[in-house]
């Protein structure tokens, strides 16, 4: 089985992937690591700030890695914000049966009430070199992700009153 964990920055994608790795022993791929490897190695002229272009650049690579994992009956967790909402269109039914998608979404109420927690957990798995957040942009991105998940009928975990993100595979 392949699990795709999506969501905007600071929603806990990496922390969830790490917990699932520890619980189920499924390896995980951080799309951010792939992005930085390609940028640092000079394989692309894109920068970490080029989000729309990065999705277009990275998704075909990640998509084929997912297909390879399914074809080889390997478990894999893939986490990152570069999974397009139209991801299902790239897979036939034989693949879709083996793929689960979930998008982590924080509500405005959660973000406004838990800013210190959000920043405090930002480096729980990986060291962030710089962490300045535009809180209104974070709220807008989460609202847009929720809208798009609902529009596409995609699974999402809504983080509202408290941060309780658990998944059973």
Image (cartoon, rainbow, N blue to C red):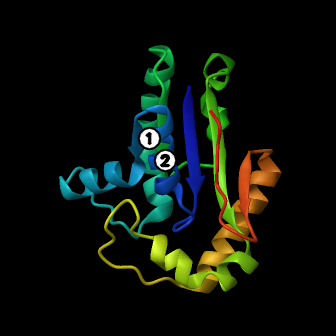
Quadrant into which the C terminus falls: top right
**Label 1 vs label 2: CA separation?**
5 Å
Query: Which residue is at a point 64% across and 40% down the rendered structure image?
Result: 101
Residue 100 to residue 155: above or below: above
Residue 63 visible, this angle: no
Residue density around tag 1, few if under 14, some if 14–19, many if 20 or more, within 10 Å: few
Residue 71 to residue 112: above or below: above
Return the x and y of residue 60 as percentages of the image width and height.
46, 38
Return the x and y of residue 84 as percentages of the image width and height.
59, 49
Residue 52 to residue 5: above or below: below
Q: How many marks?
A: 2
| Left or right of residue 3, residue 74 in this image | left
Picture quadrant of residue 29: top left
Return the x and y of residue 152 as percentages of the image width and height.
78, 47
Quadrant into which the N terminus falls: top right
Query: Which residue is at a point 70% across and 76% down the rendered structure image?
Result: 110
Q: Are marks 1 and 2 in contact (CB under 8 Å)?
A: yes
Residue under numbered circle 1: 22
Residue 2 visible, this angle: yes
| Left or right of residue 43, residue 137 in this image | right
Q: Nearer the viewer, residue 32 or 167?
A: 167
Query: Which residue is at a point 26% across and 57% down the rendered structure image?
Result: 39
Residue density around tag 2, few if under 14, some if 14–19, many if 20 or more, within 10 Å: some
Tag on residue 19? 2
Q: Nearer the viewer, residue 14 or 53?
A: 14
Q: Residue furthest left?
A: 41
Picture quadrant of residue 125: bottom left
Picture quadrant of residue 162: bottom right
Query: Which residue is at a point 65% across and 37% down the rendered structure image?
Result: 168
Q: Secondary structure at mark 1?
A: helix
Q: Secondary structure at mark 2?
A: helix
Q: Nearer the viewer, residue 85 or 125?
A: 125
């Amino acid at each position: 089985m392949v699990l795709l964990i999506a969501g905007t920055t600071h929603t806990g994608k990496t922390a969830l992937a790490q917990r699932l790795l520890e619980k189920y022993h499924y390896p995980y791929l951080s799309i951010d690591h792939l992005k930085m490897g390609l940028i640092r190695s000079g394989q692309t002229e894109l920068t970490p700030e080029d989000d729309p272009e990065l999705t277009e650049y990275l998704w075909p690579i990640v998509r084929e890695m997912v297909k390879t994992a399914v074809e080889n009956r390997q478990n894999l967790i893939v986490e990152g914000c570069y999974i397009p909402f139209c991801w299902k269109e790239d897979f036939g039914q034989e693949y879709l049966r083996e793929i689960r998608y979930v998008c982590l979404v924080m509500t405005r109420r959660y973000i406004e009430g838990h800013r210190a927690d959000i920043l405090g957990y930002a480096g729980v798995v990986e060291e962030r070199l710089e962490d300045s957040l535009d809180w209104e942009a974070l709220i807008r991105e989460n609202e847009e992700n929720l809208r798009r998940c609902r529009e596409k009928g995609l699974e999402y975990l809504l983080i509202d009153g408290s941060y309780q993100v658990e998944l059973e595979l």
